[in-house]
Image (cartoon, rainbow, N blue to C red):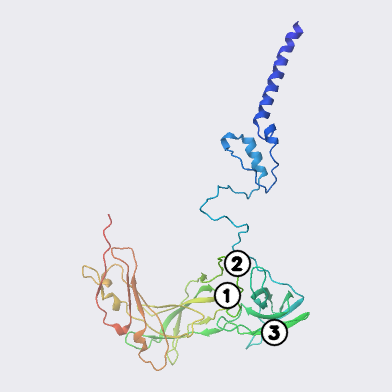
Amino acid sequence: MRRLWLLVPFLVLVTLLALRGGGRSGDDPLTSPAATREPRRDVGVLPPPAVRTPDAEPAAAREAVESTEPATSAVTKDPDPDEPPEEAEDVELYPDPVELGDCALFLEVYERSALLPVATTVHLWRLDAPGNEHWGAGAQLQATIDVGLEGGWARELPAGRYRARCLAERRANEDPHEFMVSGDTTRLRLSIDTPRERELLVQLFSADGEPIREAEFSLQVRGANSHSVGRPDWAKEREPKFDAAFVGVGMGGAWSGGRRARWKRLSADAEGWFRPGSAREGKRDETPTYRLEARVGELAPLSHYFDGDDEDLRWISVLVDPELAERSVVAPDGRSCAELSRGLRVTSGVLPFRPGQADSWRHVPVEASRRWEDDYEDFELSFTLADLPLPTRELIEKPARR
C-alpha cells in the first residue's frame, strides 16, 4: 500500500507533462496537423494568400516564416483598380552590350607640335555598330583604353570604322579623324593638341586715365570645372526600340579645389603691360579656373574670375578710390556710406584689350556692394567711369524686428 502512494506523484507529473506537450503541438502552426498540410515555402516563392496578423501568430512561428522568405521581399498591397497593371518586365534602361571580334588595336598618342608621347585615357567609339534587340544601329562606346607613353592595347574588337576621343586633348580642338580596324592587329599613331600655357597681360589705369606702373598681383588656381565626356557630337545616336523615358547621367559643372592668394610686386614693361602669370587651357574632361587680383595702396582692387579656355587673356582695368561710389550712397539720415561704420566693398573688373581704343579704360565695369548684417538692406551698384558723376542712392532700412 505504501508503494502505491509513492507512485501517485510520479503518475501526476507524467500526466501534466503529456498535457502540456499536447497543447504546444496544437498551438504551433508549423507543427500542428493543419500547418503541415500547407505547401512548402521555398526561397523566392511567395506563400499562398492568407490573413495573418502578428498578434494572432506566436513569435516562434513568425521567426520561422521570416527565415524562409527572401531578404529582398517587400510588403505587398492589394492592387489599385484605378492603376494600370504592372508589366511583366519593368526596366528603365535596357543594356546595350558591345559586340566582340577577333581584331586588336595598338594605339599610340603623340603631341602634334612637340612630337612627344602623351599618356591619356582614350574613349574608342565604333561608328557602325549594328542594332540589337533594344537599340538601333549607330555609334557605340566600344572600349576605354589607358594609353601610356609606350602605347596601349584594345582587344576583341569587331572589324569596322572607329574614332577616338583623347581626354588629354585640348578641349577646343576637333577629335582625330576616323580610322579602320581590320585583320589581326591594327597599329595606329594619333596626333593631338594638348592644352597650352598662355601668358596673361594686364594694363592698369587710374581714375584719371594715367597708366599705373607698379602694383601687387595675385593669380590663384581656384580649382577645375569638370565636363561631361559622354557621346561626342559626331557619334550617331542609337535610338531605343522601346517606349520608355530614361535619363543620361554625366558630370557637368562640377567644381573643386582652391588655393590661398600669394601676392607679388610687379612692374609694367615699356608698353605698360604687367605679366602676372599664365593659365592652362582645358582638357576634354576638365578646365582649370582662376582668380586674378591686383592692388595698389588704398585703391579698390581688381578682382576677376576666369577659366583657361577664355579666348583673350589680354585685359585692361582701372583701380579707383572707393569714395567715388561711397559718396553717392547715403543713409536715410543723410550720412554718406563712407561715414558709416561699414562702407562699400568696391572692386574693378576687366575689359579685353582692343588696339586703337585709347579711352576704353573709362568703360571697365566697377562693382560696389554692401552685404553685412546691420540696419540696412543689402545694396549693389554697377558703374563705369564714363557714368560719373553718379546719382545719389539711398540705403533702405530693414523693418524693425518684432
Residue 351 located left or right of residue 229: left
Q: Residue at x 72, y 19 (%)?
A: 14
- Considering the numbered disc 1 on the image, is that residue within a helix, a strand or a loop? loop
Which residue is identified by label 3? 189
Closer to the camera in the image, 45 or 140? 45
Residue 210 located left or right of residue 44: left
Which residue is identified by label 1? 285
Distance of label 1 from label 2 (alpha carbons) = 31 Å
Closer to the camera in the image, 226 or 48? 48
Marked residue nearer the N-terminal end (1 or 2): 2
Residue 242's label in the rendered image is 2
10 Å neighbourhood of mark 1: few (<14), some, or many (≥20)?
many
Marked residue nearer the N-terminal end (2 or 3): 3
Distance of label 2 from label 3 (alpha carbons) = 40 Å
As drawn, the residue found furthest toward the bottom would be 356
- In x, y percent, where is residue 391? 25, 78
- Considering the numbered disc 3 on the image, is that residue within a helix, a strand or a loop? strand
